[in-house]
Image (cartoon, helix red, strand yellow):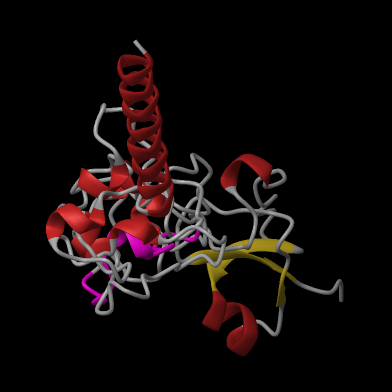
Amino acid sequence: MKTTTLILVCFCIGFVSVLLLRCNKEEDDPYNNSKYGEDDGQADTDGDGIPNELEGDGDLDGDGIPNYEDLDSDGDGIPDAIEAGEDPSNPLDSDGDGKPNFLDEDSDGDGTPDSKEGSGDTDGDGVPDYLDDDWDEEEDAGALDTDTDTDTDSDTDTDTDTDTDTDTDTDTDADGDADADSDMPCPDDGETYLCMTEGDCYDEMAGTPDPQYTCDGADDICCMFSPL
């Protein structure tokens, strides 16, 4: 009886020891690196070049695959191997927020998710859109430019009134005021006020333009003459 009891006690002690050793091993090796022949912290389970320990065992995109086994940890459609940069052991953090790009849903910090910007190069500047805060060369970062720019002045302004075409105000007489804001038409009384070209106003008649009035013709200005 005593022998049987002693055997059972020894068996229990041995079983508990094995469990403790297994738990300690898991704590020391949370990514099961030893399974892949690595014990120096450089194991790379998913083969993306980024060590398991940098990727972590979380599941950022909630797809049920831990980051260290997920080729796209943040689920933005851009592979971790690309986002990590040329040195995966020291992955890029483009916006300096403390999160490497492959774990950052907005790598350039412009307010537009990487999943929307993508890895293309819309403006052809050599910087992928997800790292380019001006990827469509618009003034507002991340805003898609749907307007054309026929005169290459950075804005669509086909009538050259300094307003974009989406601005419904035009300035056909080029007086600096939108047509909707211009004052009354030129009185054109044949004496003090006349609608004529700028050259005639200055040279022949010795008058001066009065920008508060407009004329019908795009090349005409309202010319004012001093009373005799």
Residue 170 is left or right of residue 63, and the answer is: right
Which quadrant does the C terminus fall into? bottom right
Q: Is residue 128 magenta?
A: yes
- Residue 149 visible (yes or no): no
Closer to the camera, 178 or 146?
146
Residue 172: horizontal and vertical position, in percent? Answer: 48, 54
- Of residues 54 and 108, the one drawn nearer to the viewer in this rendering: 54
Q: Residue at x 37, y 65 (%)?
A: 132
Residue 199 against residue 16 in the figure, above or below = below
Q: Quarter of the image holding residue 146?
A: top left
Q: How many marks?
A: 0
Q: Residue 152 at x, y = what percent?
A: 32, 71
Q: Residue at x 36, y 70 (%)?
A: 91
Q: Splitting the image into 4 quarters, where does residue 200 fall?
A: bottom right
Q: Residue furthest right?
A: 228
Is 127 rendered above or below residue 133? below
Q: Is residue 20 left or right of residue 185?
A: left
Q: Residue at x 77, y 72 (%)?
A: 225
Q: Does the image show residue 3?
A: yes
Q: Residue 170 location, x and y as percent?
A: 50, 48
Q: Is residue 49 magenta?
A: no
Q: Quadrant of the N terminus?
A: top left
Question: With respect to residue 91, does 18 lie above or below?
Answer: above
Magenta segment: 124-139
Looking at the image, residue 186 lies above or below residue 166: below
Specify the farthest residue to the top: 1
Magenta part mainly helix, strand or loop? loop
List x then y, in percent, for residue 211: 70, 63
The foreground one among 72 and 46 is: 46
